[in-house]
Image: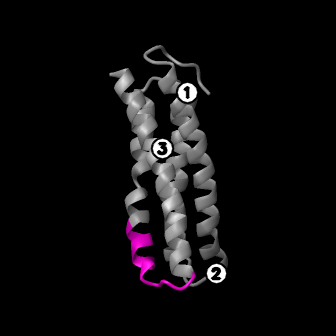
Amino acid sequence: MIRAARLAYLVLSAAFLVGMVAQVFLAGMFNFGESSYRSLHQVMGYSLHFVPVLILVAAWFSRAGKRHWQWAAALAVVTLIFPLLPAISGGNAIISALHPVGAFVAFGLAAFVARNAWQAYQLGTESAPGV
């Protein structure tokens, strides 16, 4: 059970990182002339929106240590907030501009969480110290 949770933690973390890179690519596509990619960016973004919650659950069940699920929780909070910024900005450019900044922060957190997941997976079924 612990090994499976650690594998899920690792796979979900890695998939989320790949998804974030794809999101940046799609944002670039619609910002530089291919406006049809905007809806794809939005759909994929909302799909990725909930993956950190799954990462959090996997981190919890992996029994890898308190720091693992705490960092996963931070990723989940950031990822749940930053996609909403353009919608709640009311046309305020500064608030809307925090959307890509939030994505940058989420990517950094996701990379850290993925590294933690890799370390937890390497430890196997032994309880890992908090990272």
The quarter of the picture where residue 67 lies is top right
Kindly identify the residue that appears in the image at 48 percent across and 44 percent down.
14
* Residue 70 in magenta stretch: no
Q: Do the residues labelled 2 and 3 touch (CB within 8 Å)?
A: no
In this rendered view, identify the residue nearer to me: 128 or 93.
128
Label 2 and label 3: CA atoms lie apart by 32 Å
Measured as percent of width and height from the top left, residue 106 is found at: 58, 54
Residue most extreme to the top: 126
Kindly identify the residue that appears in the image at 38 percent across and 22 percent down.
3
Reading the image, the residue beneath label 3 is 14
> Does residue 118 appear left or right of residue 101 in this picture?
left
Which image quadrant: the N terminus?
top left
Residue type indicated by callout 3: Ala
Please report the bounds of the magenta region as a residue range: 32-43
Reading the image, the residue beneath label 2 is 93
Label 1 and label 3: CA atoms lie apart by 13 Å
Reading the image, the residue beneath label 1 is 119
Select label 2 or label 3 by which is in front. 3
Select label 1 or label 2 by which is in front. 1
In this rendered view, identify the residue nearer to me: 102 or 122.
122
Q: Do the residues labelled 1 and 3 touch (CB within 8 Å)?
A: no
Measured as percent of width and height from the top left, residue 91 is found at: 57, 84
> Does residue 32 appear left or right of residue 58 in this picture?
right
Q: Earlier in the sequence, mark 1 or mark 3?
A: 3
Residue type indicated by callout 2: Ala
Residue 94 drawn above or below residue 130: below
The quarter of the picture where residue 90 lies is bottom right
